[in-house]
Image (cartoon, rainbow, N blue to C red):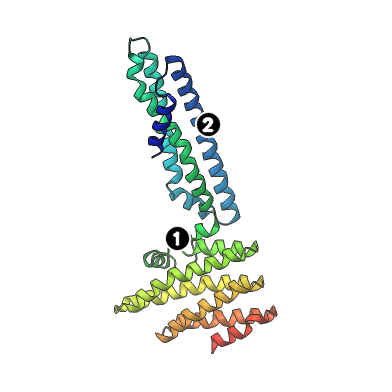
Amino acid sequence: MVITVSHLVFSYFGFLHTDVDSARYMLSALVQSEAAVIAIVATLSLVGVQLAAQSYSVRVVEVFRKTPDLWILLLIYGVTIFWGLGVLKLIESGSSQPGGLSNLEVHISFAYYLGVFVFVALVPYILSTLDLLKPSTVIKVLAEGITEESILSAIDEAPDKVHGKDPIQPIVDIVRVSLMKSDYETARAGLSAIEDRTIHIVKSLEESEQISDKTKLENVLKCLFTHIRRTGFLAANRKVGDPTLLATIILYNYGKRSAERGFEDSTWWAVVSIGRLGELIVELKFNTFVMHTIQSLE
């Protein structure tokens, strides 16, 4: 669409017919400006990602790397720049031949169209990048990696440890940093994302009739309790209302599921987690949530 509009505009103002000197000057200036713009945009994008990674989690870099926006932009700018350089070379060789330039007008015009296109493409790229650097967007992307296979793979590799392959850990990192920075909305969004993604996994394993899936379910629940408990403790220490309440509710809901299915280990984890969280709330005189914690243990 951009190329079509460019063609109509260029035709109306008579830009499609040009001489050797003006074509050479315009293309040279266009190529230089495109190279300068993509260098600035790429640099600012990387700086933005670095700042976001320092503020929340290094996993932001991985999210940005997997997003195709920058790579697509680099590709179209590279094609456009090399196309312009190729047309400049053709102008040099074609200008010495009678009628040579007129045969190149299509290539010259297309170089102009590409130039307009790549500059217009900066608008959606910038908007997309700004949205990607939001913590809520990063959490959403990271949450997509929380699957039954990824959780079980992490548990099988190191059942008693939290490590880099744990798909829940990156979101927990963002939640913890958010709590330390008093960004409570991001912390709440992270906990909600964990619950929304894991509830489908838990329900899927609950509906399975295979005995092995029951063991998998208990392992997944224990993994969840570990993460949510630590996050709840930090939220309580910071005396933050919503994240503390949400962590308690998640522990209660999954603990209830464990008890209903006779999972003694995971049920014990849930009870102990809620109990310790309640003790911490009482010690900190965070009375708003004492009653809810007591109700969870009933």
Does residue 161 show up?
no
| Residue to which mark 2 is pinned | 36
Characterize the local packing of mark 1: few (<14), some (14-19) or many (20 or more) Cα atoms within 10 angstroms.
some
Circle 1 is placed at which residue position? 165
Residue 17 x %, y %:
40, 20
Which amino acid type is shown beneath numbered disc 2? Answer: Ala
Residue in view at x 42 percent, y 15 percent: 20
**Residue drawn at the location 52% of the way across and 69% of the way down:** 191
Residue 103 visible in the picture: yes
- Name the foreground residue: 208 vs 155: 208
Label 2: few (<14), some (14–19) or many (≥20) C-alpha neighbours in 10 Å: few
Residue 266 location, x and y as percent?
46, 80
Horizontally, residue 115 falls left or right of residue 185, namely left
Please tell me whether mark 1 or mark 2 is closer to you in this view. Answer: 2
Q: Out of 43 and 93, give the one closest to the viewer.
A: 93
Q: Residue at x 48, y 80 (%)?
A: 253
